[in-house]
Image (cartoon, rainbow, N blue to C red):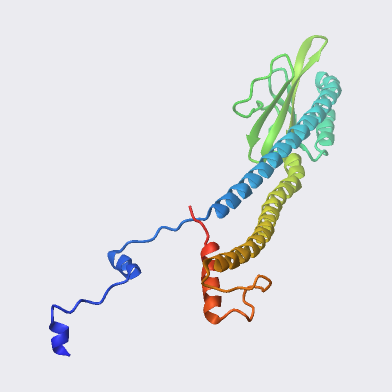
């Protein structure tokens, strides 16, 4: 036994190809079938299309709600300005305070400020604001001159639509009105729509996956029957297996060796093609 192990003439045991590849540290690259690639591509395109359509519809709805809120804010600001001119001229601060309180009953109104022609506060929706102090405007907003301004900015409570209205009496500027509308109502209105859009994207991906799997199973079953018939035909033509033409594959007239040959031919004909 020892002489056999030390004899250089005795060939070493052969190492199989997978074992050699493992020893060499090489890894076999994973190849994804073309069918899987196409399925993933179609699913991605469907999801992307549904997402883009959903975003477009959400954008359209947001613009529509913003335009509606802007129109309502303009109407409210003009009506408030018309009612505030007389109390402003008569220095009736109590009436101005009542007007501000009534305006703040609207849940979408963020603030209301009435100032004189020098820019000093006469009435403010914030009780902490000091009367006769200079109105502090958010940075980035254009200063009010002789025309109505509608501007938007971001505050701590969210997006605000600011309406600045000059108060003019008989062509003489007597003050200014600043009214802010919060866009929080728009965000609340769009929240269910966003959830619906996300659900539609997920449903589209799920439905596409299910349809692709079912269609793939139908194609696979059809190809299986064709492969069985082809294997039997090849076996007959080769002459190595005797298969009756009216007998099904795997029936009793076939011997075990014939069954093995037919199975080998069937596996070879159904071998998947990778790219």
Q: Quadrant of residue 174?
A: top right
Q: How many marks?
A: 0
Is residue 239 rendered to the left or right of residue 59? Answer: left
Is residue 264 rendered to the left or right of residue 105? Answer: left
Residue at image point 82% right, 38% down:
106
Question: Which quarter of the figure is the N terminus placed in?
Answer: bottom left
Residue at image point 73% right, 15% down:
147
Q: Position of residue 105 (x, y in %)?
A: 83, 39
Q: Which residue in the rendered view is the most extreme toward the bottom?
A: 1
125 and 25: which one is in front? Answer: 25
Res. 175 in view? yes
Q: Position of residue 151 (x, y in %)?
A: 69, 26
168 and 165: which one is in front? Answer: 165
Q: Which residue in the rendered view is the most extreme toward the top?
A: 171
Q: Quadrant of residue 91?
A: top right
Is residue 9 rendered to the left or right of residue 112? Answer: left
Residue at image point 83% right, 20% down:
85
Res. 127 in view? no
Q: Quadrant of residue 136?
A: top right
17 and 256: which one is in front? Answer: 256
91 and 264: which one is in front? Answer: 264
Q: Position of residue 195 (x, y in %)?
A: 72, 50
For residue 268, above or below residue 111: below
Q: Position of residue 237 (x, y in %)?
A: 55, 65
For residue 139, above or below residue 201: above
């Amino acid at each position: 036994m020892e002489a056999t192990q030390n004899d250089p003439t005795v060939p070493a045991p052969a190492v199989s190809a997978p074992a050699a590849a493992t020893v060499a540290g090489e890894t076999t690259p994973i190849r994804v079938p073309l069918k899987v690639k196409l399925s993933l591509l179609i699913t991605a395109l469907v999801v992307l299309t549904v997402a883009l359509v959903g975003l477009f519809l959400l954008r359209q709805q947001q613009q529509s709600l913003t335009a509606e809120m802007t129109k309502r804010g303009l109407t409210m600001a003009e009506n408030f300005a018309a009612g505030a001119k007389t109390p402003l001229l008569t220095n009736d601060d109590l009436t101005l305070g009542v007007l501000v309180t009534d305006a703040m009953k609207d849940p979408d109104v963020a603030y209301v400020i009435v100032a004189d022609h020098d820019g000093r506060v006469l009435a403010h929706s914030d009780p902490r604001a000091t009367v006769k102090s200079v109105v502090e405007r958010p940075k980035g907003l254009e200063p009010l001159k002789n025309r109505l301004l509608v501007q938007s900015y971001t505050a701590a409570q969210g997006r605000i639509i600011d309406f600045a209205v000059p108060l003019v009496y008989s062509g003489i500027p007597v003050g200014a009105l600043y009214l802010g509308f919060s866009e929080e109502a728009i965000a609340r209105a769009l929240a269910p729509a966003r959830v619906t859009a996300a659900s539609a994207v997920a449903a589209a991906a799920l439905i596409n996956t299910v349809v692709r799997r079912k269609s793939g199973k139908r194609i696979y079953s059809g190809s299986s029957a064709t492969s069985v018939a082809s294997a039997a035909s090849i076996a007959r033509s080769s002459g190595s297996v005797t298969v009756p033409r009216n007998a099904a594959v795997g029936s009793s007239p076939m011997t075990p060796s014939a069954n093995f040959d037919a199975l080998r031919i069937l596996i070879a004909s159904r071998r998947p093609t990778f790219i």
